[in-house]
Image (cartoon, rainbow, N blue to C red):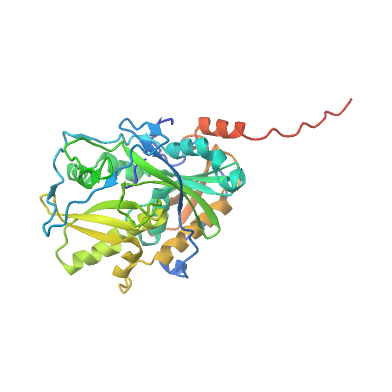
Amino acid sequence: MDRRGTKRRGENIEVAEPRNKLPGPAPSMPTDPALYSGPFPFYRRPSELGCFSLDAQRQYHGDAQALRYYSPPPTNGQGPNFDLRDGYPDRYQPRDEEIREGLDHLLRWLLDHRGQLEGGPGWLAGAIVTWRGHLTKLLTTPYERQEGWQLAASRFQGTLYLSEVETPAARAQRLARPPLLRELMYMGYKFEQYMCADKPGSSPDPSGEVNTNVAFCSVLRSRLGNHPLLFSGEVDCIDPQAPSTQPPTCYVELKTSKEMHSPGQWRSFYRHKLLKWWAQSFLLGIPNVVAGFRNPEGFICSLKTFPTMEMFEYVRNDRDGWNPSVCMNFCAAFLSFAQNTVVQDDPRLVYLFSWEPGSPVTVSKHQDAPYAFLPTWYVEAMTQDLPSPPKTPSPKN
């Protein structure tokens, strides 16, 4: 699951033409899957550079204190019978979604570790910095039929930063979220509580509070095509029994889904939900997704492990299925589009990439609020790192 230091209150951006919109070219990029069906592009195996944790008050810690340990129930032939409604809403502390964090936590990590990056400042100057969740949305775009997105992009000291903007439609949907959907969100977190322990070898304790401020995030380096990537994603847990102790291959993603009873339901699950699970886990290099299937009463009645590299097999022969090559080729093409579009190096200048299903990706250009997202503390700290320009002697009069 992907949930994200200075904290800024979310600004209402439901305006047709923001005051600070600048004139500029209006290129666009098509998203039709048929245009991206070539061979699978190069994707470097993600390697973990470090990690950070967010505590119960959403405060940043540059360590692994929030990491949990995979501790599944014994397989005795019976379903686990986890009650996902237990503790709702009394023992539930949801994160304040009005606080728009942007890239702030990842930038805090980057500021602390910028001197230790292999390749140094030169590598970072050519890289793209973002959240894994933003890349997931790009991967699934050619097959997405319901939800649009907006990505703000700024170039600073050569590096391209991508940060999601909540669309007016997504904001309206969040504010009008029905009680049943809020409870379903809780159930996903509750499942993690049943499946994870605080220490290796110990047992899960589902009696505590479910607090969605808490998060453990891995920071990784990879490359898609010729685009170096530095990105971060939330990790549910680590498997102490994994064949390799090397992150990210020892990490496990936990998911819930409703129980399926017909071939049609399974087909829909493979076409839609499994695509998002694949994109999320493949990007981070997580080898397995463990799914809990819940009945209408909210109890987990079965568990199933989906190896990430085998997910495509479920739709390979489905003419309405998805193709990993299309997803990755589109993402690589978008990153090239963004690199070629965001030409000015200015942390206050934002190129806003917008997409709605059935339409191409479009771009608009904005200065400062409400879209600028690189915090002043980050820009100032990174600027102070620059070597002083050589002094030129002043001409004598």
Residue extending furthest toward the right: 397
Q: Residue 125: x percent and y percent?
A: 59, 46
Q: Quadrant of residue 65?
A: top left
Q: Residue 113: x percent and y percent?
A: 51, 38
Q: In which quarter of the image is residue 295?
A: bottom left
Q: Residue 225: x percent and y percent?
A: 52, 60
Q: Of 327 and 44, which appears nearest the observer?
A: 44
Q: Residue 60: x percent and y percent?
A: 40, 33
Q: Of 15 and 312, which appears nearest the observer?
A: 312
Any part of residue 95 in sight: yes
Residue extending furthest toward the top: 397
Number of marks in picture: 0
Any part of residue 337 in sight: no
Query: Is residue 356 shown above or below 217?
Result: below
Q: In this view, does 319 lie to the left or right of 392?
A: left
Name the residue: 19% across, 67% down.
264
Name the residue: 27% across, 51% down.
254
Q: Quadrant of the C terminus?
A: top right
Q: In this view, does 168 lie to the left or right of 179?
A: right
